[in-house]
Image (cartoon, helix red, strand yellow):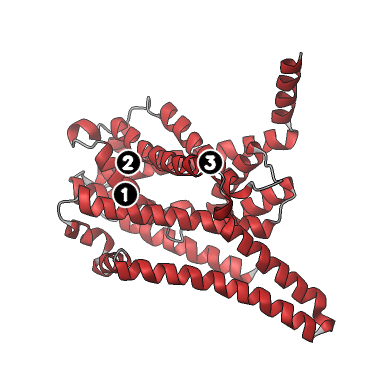
Amino acid sequence: MLNKYLRFIASVIVAAVFLWLALRDVSFHDLRLTMGKLTYFWLLPYLLISLFSHYLRAERWKQLIEQEGIRTSRMNLFSGVMLGYMVNYAVPRLGEVSRSIFVGNREQISRTKLMGTVVLERALDLLVVLVLVVFVLVYLLTDYRVIVPLLGTETVQWLQSLLSIDGAMILAIMAIAVIAAVYLLYRLALLLDKWIPSLHRFFQTLGDISKKFIQGLLSIRQVKNWPLFILLTAAIWFCYVLMTYIPFTAFNLHTEYGLGMREALVVTVVSALGMSLPSPGGIGTYHWFVSRTLLLLFAVPEALGVAYAIVTHLVMMMIILVATPLLLAVNKAGWHQKLNTGANAGQKE
């Protein structure tokens, strides 16, 4: 319990520091004037694409969970993904645990195994981000040194080393080491179970947890439809780029500063790095990374960049906070199951 409180306090401090960095040089008068010129026709497509991206993530998760004899409800998975996002606004990374518990209880599947699939999913997203970072640095930015003021010299050097052949080998070795460590923990629990019979239940539980977590991590081997899995991953990130581009039109950035899909991809990649930091729902980190990217790379005035970051993040948050309770209520009431039953009955007739 104490650890959760410390994590929450640390995340709030991170959010406060980055929010201060984003707002410290911005005139609130300019910020208010900028937001006053905002057009709202973009909200509907933004809302639909945002929800669709979360649904696609649930559909991709389904590909990792479902194996021989295991079938899952799309509504349960979608509700679990949304619940995870909502919990992350309170305590970062706790959402991954929450959605595993929710879906595990609803589907009667091992929650530990589900947690393994969530860790695997996050690792895949990290891999996609690294690939996109390489693409942005090599093909979209004429000089990678322009991002030094944004990320810092040490971070750029770390990314360079990480994206090198040696860095890729180190990442692969670390991934293998983690799996091997969990497997050794499982084998150790089995040995100790034999040596210390009085602690049989404890070591048996520890062994089961380790085994199921490994099964979740290795669930990628069970993916039956790889073309669909890759297509879902690409579609998720395409939705994210669209969610960056659509608000450009609301702030007229597409005409005044020539920001298009290419620039939206750059902002999406940088904002993903910001969202990965331990801040509640990316509060503060998202605002700073996005506003600095718009200023340093595309010469968008700071007040306009901060207004863009505030509005887009606020809309993202409101979608999660409004849609999630509604989905959970529908899920609990079982209305989606009644509709499916009625549709199936109509087809039989």
Amino acid type, label 3: Ile
Sequence-first tag of 2 and 1: 1
**Residue 36, image quadrant:** top left
Q: Which mark is residue 227?
A: none
**CB-based contact (under 8 Å), mark 2 and mark 1:** yes
| Local SS, label 3 | helix
- Name which residue lies at 38% across and 39% down: 238
* Residue 159: image location, x then y, percent: 30, 64
When the figure is inspected, residue 216 is found, relative to residue 173, above or below; the finding is above
Amino acid type, label 1: Val
Is there any visible trace of residue 279 in the rendered image?
Answer: yes
Return the residue at label 2. 308
Whether residue 187 sits left or right of residue 180 in the image: it is: right
* Residue 125: image location, x then y, percent: 44, 53
- Nearer the observer: mark 2 or 3; the answer is 3
| Local SS, label 1 | helix
